[in-house]
Image (cartoon, coloured by chain):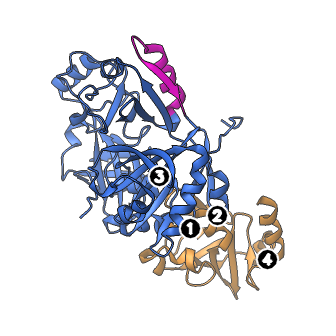
Amino acid sequence: MPQPAGLLFSKDHEWVKLDGDVATVGITDYAQTSLGDIVYVELPRLGATLTQFGNIGVVESVKAVSDINTPVGGEVVETNEAIDADPSLVNRAPFDEGWLYKVKLADHGETANLMTGDAYDTLIAESA
Amino acid sequence: MEDEILRRTALFETHRALGGRIVPFGGFEMPVQYAGILAEHDAVRKRAGVFDLSHMAQFELRGDDVAAWADTLTVNHVATMKPLQARYNIFTNPHGGAHDDVIFYRLPDRWLLIVNAANATKMWAHLEAHVRGDVRLTNRHGEDALIAIQGPQSVAMLAPFVSADIAAMKYYTCVETSIAGVPGVVARTGYTGEDGFELFVPGDAAVGLWDALLHANRDSGLTPCGLGARDVLRLEAGMPLYGHELDETITPLQAGLPWVVKFAKPAFEGKAALEAQSAAGDFSRIVGLRLDGRVPARAGYPVLRDGVKVGEIRSGSIAPSVGNASIATALVDLASATEGVRLGVEVRGTEHHATVVTLPFYKRG
């Protein structure tokens, strides 16, 4: 299945949606399927400064703990409070209501370290 | 072990066809889940689920001395078992630790002993090394299949396939009967905290039985369930899992299973050590924990009291049958092992508050 248009992807199975200086971050459909039922998400605090590819939180399923390695650096300007109450949103709508946090980009150049949807599809096809 | 050669049960291709996610478990390639752990858990609590447990080792014991012999190696009574009775038991080492927790099934002409898959090799060697008198062992591990049907609708869903009157069976009894036209054993036992049955059939009958059960009960919501759901179900029901709540260093007394230990038996492996432990009373023990928040507590996480480590998590999960609370078992020191004591669980360097609670977390209504 092709990835949603207009997103960039990391090899750690996060997606990024750019809107000016602000990037919305989530995990991919492939990632949520691999994890299974998600029961807990630990996100960075508002105002925290993230470094690209740093380990900044976790997504936990019933059986597994998976690190979130942030695909972009910068300041956390919003976190998705809805997934605190209902972590299964990440399973049901990983590219929409199940987004994780928003970052004010420190350096637009970092997006050059991410992949297009087609390149990400190739990556997961190879790891399958 | 990466070079371990994994075995497959008779149902392996069936699991794959059902979309089962296959993982190594106890030396076998087993389904950890199909549609999802939470949906499968829900099916067992509300309707019924069907599990392939053929990875568990089935040993047959025959001979006039089986009961007396087994009584010397285990903490619970064996000789007092009546025909067609099942009983939970624990094989112990000289220090009172557990070699394995098992179920004995007494059939008219033999005994069935079901041991954990991960302990199958160890337990077979243990039994063979101790054989004496008229005791004959047959290892049927991987030859016979074990299929469980668990949940409040188990009787209705299974009854059409069994000659015997399963509705009349008492908990922890078994019967030799015809199952979907094949001779086998039906036992009213399980590991989920629900009513249910475990079905022992020849391996070559497993696929036919599995498919027939699911086909006949599709509209009633019988659901194939993997080992992931089983682990959540047993934890909610407060049932120990070998390697977590019991192991070679954790005794049945520490595991909160004193009712299994029959000190009235004249002699059994580890009896002196267990008597000494019981008399001293100052041992660490397994308790239930309920965390204040939703963060899962995983095996190995430190357990703190007033900032000082007093134990560690042995099992943990989010518990759908306990309001989606984060529940866990922990091995903690005696002073902390009292209902209501406030403890902390260290998760990735942060302490999360928890309360000691009485097991089980869940009891069927």
Q: Nearer the viewer, residue A28 or A72?
A: A28
**Are dots 4 and 3 on a single chain?**
no
Discs 2, 4 touching: Cβ within 8 Å = no
Q: Is residue B36 magenta?
A: no
Q: Which residue is mark 2?
A: B19
Name the foreground residue: B235 vs B102.
B102
Q: Chain of mark 2?
A: B
Q: Which colour is chain A painted?
A: orange
Task: Give whichever of discs 1 and 2 has the lower sequence position.
Answer: 2
- Callouts 2 and 4 on one subunit: no
Magenta residues, start to end: B119-140
Tell me the number on the disc at residue B22: none
- Where residue A76 appears, as percent x and y from the top left, is 56, 76
Q: Amino acid at mark 1?
A: Ala
Q: Amino acid at mark 4?
A: Gly
In the image: residue B90, left or right of residue A121? left
The spot of residue B37 in percent (x, y) is 50, 63
